[in-house]
Amino acid sequence: MAEKTPSATPKPLVAAVKRLLRPLVRLLIAKGMGLPALNDLLKQVYVDVALRDFPSQGKKQTDSSISILTGVHRKDVKRLRDIRDKGPQAPRSISIGGQAVAQWLGSAKTTDRKGRPLALPRQPESPDGPSFDALVAGISKDVRPRAVLDEWLRLGIAHLDTEGRVVLNRLAFVPEKGFEEKAFYLGRNVHDHLAAAAHNLLEEGEPQLERSVHYTALTGESAAILAEAAERVGMQALLDINRLALDLVAKDKGKESATKRVNFGLYFHKGLSNFKTARPEDESEDSGA
């Protein structure tokens, strides 16, 4: 069976993959997932990607052809080819909650003049006034607003003020608690970031946005200043994109061509500089943009 060896893969790609795997492996070890389980998972992904993205031109994708393409043993291919990835299923708290936060931050009725979210009463205080219950009901009639609120309080997304109004803790649906919810965002956001970078590396058409600013040799105080600035400026960018997206979603509703999905993200990482004693995964690149 012909199988690509590490030496047949471009060395810069091997180095990049080794580096990006470090934080993932650290997470897996911490959560009790060893190499055998990861190996089986990788086999599933290799077979699924081969079936989806590398169809044979005018030929049937046999177990042998997939084995040659991926390096997965033919017996494993036969076992795994019917285990197709149906895509991630968002927890109910995210599928409803994320839409509710987006509407809350994107509507003039639920934000002040500076675009900051208003504290919402559970029920409208006037006939046309905004309320938390109306916000949730406008997204789904199948879930009780009280259930959404209880979940938000559990996840640390919102709290109640002294008047019993619902107040957002952050300007995005980012759970402070809830392993299932945070794991979902890990899979979706890192996937999309990596997909954009892979698209650009493979030169599969118009380049996609994938940029960063990175500096070394900073004190902890300076890093904290940059972290605050990054969150402030970055959150404003997210709010602007959110409002524009809500307008476009309403405009595109019902169109057969409305089949695209977008994800505009934000992250900030603080680690040790590469000239200090540091674990490899904590090393940073040279300064620049």
Image: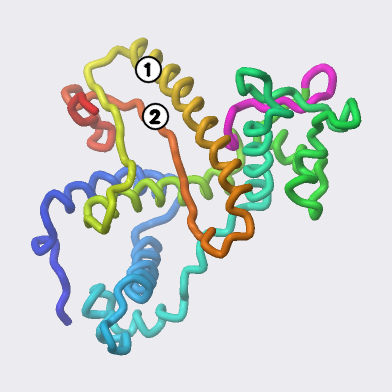
Please give left or right for residue 170 compared with residue 38 in the image.
right
Q: Amino acid at mark 1?
A: Leu
- In terms of sequence position, does the residue under pointer 1 or pointer 2 come before the other? 1
Quarter of the image where one finds residue 210: top left
Query: Cβ–Cβ below 8 Å for labels 1 and 2?
Result: yes
- Judge whether residue 173 is colored magenta: yes
Looking at the image, can residue 89 be seen? yes
- Looking at the rendered structure, the secondary structure element under dot 1 is helix
Is 153 colored magenta in this rendering? Answer: no
Q: Is residue 139 left or right of residue 162?
A: left
Q: Mark 2 = which residue? A: 268
Image quarter for residue 277?
A: top left
Q: Residue furthest left?
A: 7
Dominant secondary structure (helix, strand or loop) of the stretch shown in magenta: loop
- Residue of label 1: 226
Q: Say which quadrant the C terminus sits in.
A: top left
* Residue at x-position 67% and y-position 27%: 168
Q: For the residues marked 1 and 2, what is the alpha-carbon distance in whole angstroms?
A: 9 Å
Q: Position of residue 26 (x, y in %)?
A: 36, 44
Residue occupying the point 39% across, 29% down: 268
Q: Determine whether 122 is above or below 33 in the image.
A: above
At 81% across and 52% down in the image, what residue appears? Answer: 141
The quarter holding residue 278 reads top left
**Pick the front one: 39 or 190:** 190
Range drawn in magenta? 161-175
